[in-house]
Amino acid sequence: MKRKLFILLPILLAGVALDLVTKQLILAYLPLGSQIPVIKGFFNVVHVHNRGAAFGLMGSWSLDFVRIFFVCTTGIVLLVVGYLWWRLPGDQRLAAVGYSLIMAGALGNLVDRVRFGEVVDFLDLYWGRYHWPAFNVADSLVCLGAGVLIWVILREEKGVNVSSPA
């Protein structure tokens, strides 16, 4: 348990802090709806708010309902992921990293949901006319954590021990 806590706490603290600081910078210095080109034809920093879920799903629902829905849903997700983290054997460090990243991202967006009823998104990737919906650090942490867990599962299916370096 102690080894897993040394993984969880730094990731949780650093991840949530990075997410909240970057969102605060966007709120303070970039007007809503504006953008700053960073890499022409590929990446902008923007300031948008997303009331809904991924890709703007449920964005037209009432703010009060969306806030309650996502706060409750995120709470359940945090409980489930926290339980899975707690049940991990101590030698499953890489899986602990994956779960920790997911919890950090969920907490970062939960803070926005509680404060504003929506999340602040600001990373904007695109290629020509193909445009990915804007996202934030918390979203990136959740995706990275899920990717780590998928990698762990695939490696375990092949019988490779991922808990220690090869």
Image (spheres, rainbow, N blue to C red):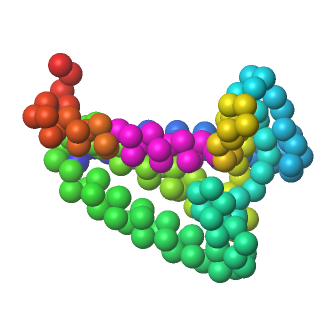
Where residue 16 appears, as percent x and y from the top left, is: 56, 46
Tell me: residue 83, above or below residue 93.
Answer: below
Tell me: residue 71, above or below residue 5.
Answer: below
Tell me: residue 161, above or below residue 59.
Answer: above
In depth, the one of 158 and 9 nearer the eye is 158
Q: Quadrant of residue 71?
A: bottom right
Residue span colored magenta: 135-148
Q: Residue at x 27, y 57 (%)?
A: 84
The answer to whether any part of residue 11 appears in the image is no
Q: Is 134 placed left or right of 164 in the picture?
A: right
Residue 87 among magenta residues:
no
Q: Quadrant of residue 52?
A: bottom right
Give the residue at the far left of this rendering.
159
The answer to whether any part of residue 102 appears in the image is yes
Q: Is 15 placed left or right of 67 in the picture?
A: left
Where residue 139 appears, as percent x and y from the top left, is: 56, 47
Q: Residue at x 34, y 64 (%)?
A: 80
Q: Residue at x 70, y 59 (%)?
A: 50
Magenta part, dominant SS: helix
Give the mark count.
0
Q: Quadrant of the C terminus?
A: top left
Q: Quadrant of residue 4?
A: top left
Give the residue at the far top of this rendering.
166
Where residue 118 appears, as percent x and y from the top left, is: 69, 63
Give the residue at the far front of this rendering.
129
